[in-house]
Amino acid sequence: MKFDTANVIWTVVIVMLVAGFGIYTYRTFIAGEDVGIGDITKPTQEPFAGNIDIKTSETDFLGGAAHTSSNAILKFYTVEPVDSDAAGVVISSTAKNIYLPEKNKGKAWVSIHNEDDGYLIAKWMESIFKQNNPEIVEVMYRDLNNDNKKEMVARLDFSDILVSSGQDPEWTFIINWIDEDVASWSDDDPADQTGLGETSGTDFTITWKLSGITAEDGAVIGKLYFVTNDTREGNDIRLEDVKLYGGHTIMGKSSWANPVAISNGDYEAYYYAPTEYTDPFEGILVYRKTDASDSLFVDLSGKLYLETNNKITVDLYMELVGGDGTTTQVNDQVLLNEA
């Protein structure tokens, strides 16, 4: 019997190619193995464990320029930080190589202690903060230093971090700040209101115009309240609505139908007054964009119950909180006179 050697060889070659392609297809698309060539970058199939280069990139949120924070403390953790016992690694713009253990299953944490002269936007614009750092899955606020000021704590997930063979992966923590400007605020000293006559539930409104924020800077309102010389609510005056508006962008509550708390003796009405009001993360952020007018209007409305010769004073008090928790007070008095 004769054999056609050429046909046999071609048959063997074709069988080997078909078998090889079948094995490749199985390993790649069914078993999920990496059968590529070289050090092609790809997401890990399991939560990342190993060494990772961590660094920060800080910018001004409004201007976009590089930002050098003043006394901010930035840390990275492989154990969740819950109190002052948390042991983190200080991170900066210089990459630091940190080991993430396998038991973490890709989880890690970062914290930021707010800087002295600005505000971390994460509290008021969390969606932007997460967009810049997609590894962040949860943002929390905890007092890690026992100083009555909270740190921002974020939980990270490195399950899909990109890795390349032969080198440690890198992660850059992007942080946006707004510079503070609280020192030069002033108001337009609205005129006293006289000749109001005797009243019985007559509506009144006082409008203050505040200014003093440099373009691309901001401030945090920690407390907003009003003090009168009346003895109790509804005797000669009742304070009701308050509204904030104007050229400044307001991040937080900006209107109240009634005060959240009052005190009598000297009748006082509080509209925004968190317990830890010197913590900038507890306040209302206002900032001025490049092309925005330098104006923040405060409208106070209420009712008057004036009798002959009644003179009621209304004082505006606004406590501005700096990044380090120091406060600056804005105050102005308006007279409401029956005569």
Image (cartoon, grey):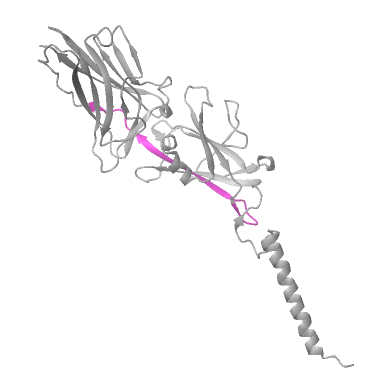
Rendering quarter of residue 257: top left
Position of 139 relative to 147 (above/below): below
Residue 27 position, x and y percent, is: 71, 62
- Is 263 in front, or is 99? 263
Q: Is residue 240 above or below residue 66?
A: above
Q: Is residue 243 above or below residue 39?
A: above
Q: Point out residue 41 in the picture as x, y percentages from the top left corner.
A: 60, 58
Question: Whole-percent x and y of residue 321?
Answer: 36, 26
Left/right placement of residue 26 relative to residue 154 reads right
Nearest the eye: 235 or 177: 235
Residue drawn where x is 82% and y is 89% of the image: 5
Q: Position of residue 227 (x, y in %)?
A: 27, 14
In the rendered view, does 74 fall on the left or right side of 184? right
Nearest to the observer: residue 258 or residue 195? 258
Who's the residue at 52% across and 22% down the image? Answer: 146
Taking the image as shown, residue 126 lies to the left or right of residue 51, namely left
User: Image quarter for residue 38?
Assistant: bottom right
Magenta stretch holds residue 164: yes
- Total marks shown come to 0
Q: Nearer the viewer, residue 98 or 139?
A: 139
Q: For residue 199: magenta? A: no
Viewport quadrant of the C terminus:
top left
**Residue span colored magenta:** 162-186
Which quarter of the figure is the N terminus placed in?
bottom right
- Residue shown at the point (71%, 71%) measured from the top left: 21
Q: Residue furthest toward the bottom?
A: 2
Residue 256 vs residue 323: left or right?
Answer: left
